[in-house]
Image: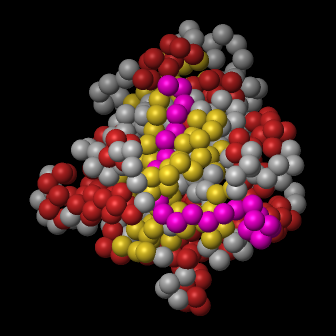
């Protein structure tokens, strides 16, 4: 493994399926998507059938509460060994440049390994690699159970760099040499097109040099207008926060017995430039299932006179009211019931957080602790909020988006954002499992 300890980077050895594999069946979407839409995962299983697939190497989160989970984990780990030993997976050395096209947009990324010794997801962390949202440690054990016995890792982790001049990833797109085509195919279920190129030495060297420049203390201080030498933040979590936290937790547990040179010290991720024109920050909305208490009564109890409700004639009016809100009042959409009056907006005049998502989450945490609903889920897209919130016994909350250009400075100055604040694209735009890496 070639490592660059000063910037927490390692050049990966990746494994890709051999030529002739049906890649449209091999690649499936991140396990934490469509968690309230079982029909999506039924379609995936039907499409994959008996073909080799990353579906057999992951546990979709929608199945976490299903019976037989322990046996499913054992099957996943056995299949990893099977795919390695029967020659299905073939080794390639080096970074991978990725282009993802969906809905007329193209997003660019770069696969490499990050050093978990340079990452700390704890609140108030000043590590080189940092969480952007709060980490719920209670969510880690099920993920740890899979990773601890796994021969492979498959990344759906997206990590951001703040590179306004486009010095790290963008030159790879502009150049035509020093790269080899690895894959180029359509993803399943209208999720766009995926292309990947393996990079050769000179291009990788240029990437490392550009990352080192971003990590220079003087560059960092000037970019954010810092008066003192704050600890450098080079890599900020985008998607897959709990997956990287799981890798960190497993590494901390195992390193006393395996030593510091073990491959599990590193995690395979895709880095993307927060300024990429194809990258959009989408809000993550909330849906309550199986309501046991009245939501409006609970809201007035929590916020008092500082919350008001106004009805909307349609979902479109609700969305527009939230998206166009300005000033000190925070506006949140509410969908509840099946009648014509099911849409409205909440206005909070003395919010408890700088972001509407933080203000709402504070209420929802208390509401769930008191047993106000059977379940809460975090969903993408106004249509999903509308559909699920309109079901009997449910309530959906539509949230505004945050500015991606302010993400790094906010994290540097204020720390991690409230959990599930933003998403890099909507559900079907999420990363698909494609590449694997040995961690055993």
**Front-lying residue, 116 or 336:** 116
Q: Does the magenta stretch include residue 91?
A: yes
The answer to whether any part of residue 138 appears in the image is no
**Front-lying residue, 414 or 181:** 181
Left-right relation of 308 to 329: right
Most extreme residue toward the front, as rendered?
177
Left-right relation of 331 to 409: right
Most extreme residue toward the left, as rendered?
227
The answer to whether any part of residue 412 appears in the image is yes
In the image, the segment drawn in magenta is: 81-104
- Percent across and percent down for residue 118 are 40, 72
- What residue lies at 64% left-to-right and 57% top-to-bottom? 16
The picture quadrant where one finds residue 69 is: bottom right
The picture quadrant where one finds residue 204 is: bottom left
- Percent across and percent down for residue 353 are 38, 44
- What residue lies at 65% left-to-right and 77% top-to-bottom? 440
- What residue lies at 70% left-to-right and 32% top-to-bottom? 189
- What residue lies at 66% left-to-right and 67% top-to-bottom? 152
- Percent across and percent down for residue 252 are 54, 79
Relative vertical location of residue 56 with respect to residue 44 in this rendering, above or below: below
- Percent across and percent down for residue 71 are 86, 65
Q: Does the magenta stretch include residue 39?
A: no
Relative vertical location of residue 201 with respect to residue 273 in this rendering, above or below: below
The picture quadrant where one finds residue 131 is: bottom left
Relative vertical location of residue 392 with respect to residue 19 in this rendering, above or below: above
């Amino acid at each position: 493994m070639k490592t660059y300890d000063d910037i927490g980077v390692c050049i990966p050895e990746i494994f890709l399926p051999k030529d002739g594999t049906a890649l449209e069946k091999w690649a499936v979407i991140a396990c934490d998507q469509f968690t309230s839409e079982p029909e999506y995962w039924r379609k995936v299983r039907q499409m994959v059938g008996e073909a080799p697939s990353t579906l057999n190497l992951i546990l979709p989160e929608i199945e976490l509460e299903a019976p037989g989970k322990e046996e499913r984990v054992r099957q996943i780990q056995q299949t990893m060994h099977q795919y390695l030993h029967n020659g299905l997976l073939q080794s390639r050395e080096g970074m991978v440049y990725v282009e993802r096209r969906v809905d007329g947009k193209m997003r660019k990324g770069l696969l490499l390994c990050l050093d978990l010794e340079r990452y700390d997801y704890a609140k108030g962390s000043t590590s080189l690699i940092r969480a952007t949202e709060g980490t719920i440690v209670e969510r880690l054990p099920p993920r740890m159970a899979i990773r601890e016995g796994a021969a492979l890792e498959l990344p759906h982790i997206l990590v951001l760099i703040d590179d306004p001049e486009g010095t790290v990833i963008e030159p790879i797109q502009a150049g035509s040499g020093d790269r080899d085509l690895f894959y180029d195919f359509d993803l399943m279920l209208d999720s766009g097109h995926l292309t990947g190129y393996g990079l050769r030495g000179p291009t990788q060297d240029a990437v490392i040099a550009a990352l080192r420049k971003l990590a220079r203390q003087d560059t960092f201080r000037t970019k954010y207008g810092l008066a003192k030498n704050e600890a450098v933040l080079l890599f900020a979590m985008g998607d897959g926060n709990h997956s990287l936290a799981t890798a960190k937790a497993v590494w901390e547990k195992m390193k006393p017995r395996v030593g510091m040179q073990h491959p599990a010290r590193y995690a395979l991720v895709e880095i993307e430039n927060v300024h990429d024109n194809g990258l959009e920050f989408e809000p993550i909305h909330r849906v309550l299932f199986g309501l046991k208490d009245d939501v409006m009564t609970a809201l007035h109890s929590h916020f008092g006179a500082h919350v008001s409700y106004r009805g909307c004639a349609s979902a479109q009016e609700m969305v527009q009211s939230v998206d166009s809100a300005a000033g000190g009042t925070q506006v949140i959409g509410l969908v509840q019931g099946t009648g014509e009056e099911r849409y409205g907006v909440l206005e909070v005049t003395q919010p408890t957080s700088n972001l509407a998502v933080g203000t709402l989450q504070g209420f929802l945490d208390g509401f769930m602790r008191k047993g106000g609903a059977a379940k809460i889920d975090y969903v993408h897209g106004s249509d999903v909020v509308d559909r699920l919130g309109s079901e009997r016994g449910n309530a959906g909350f539509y949230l505004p988006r945050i500015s991606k250009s302010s993400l790094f400075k906010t994290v540097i100055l204020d720390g991690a954002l409230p959990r599930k604040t933003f998403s890099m694209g909507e559900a079907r735009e999420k990363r698909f499992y494609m590449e694997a890496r040995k961690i055993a």
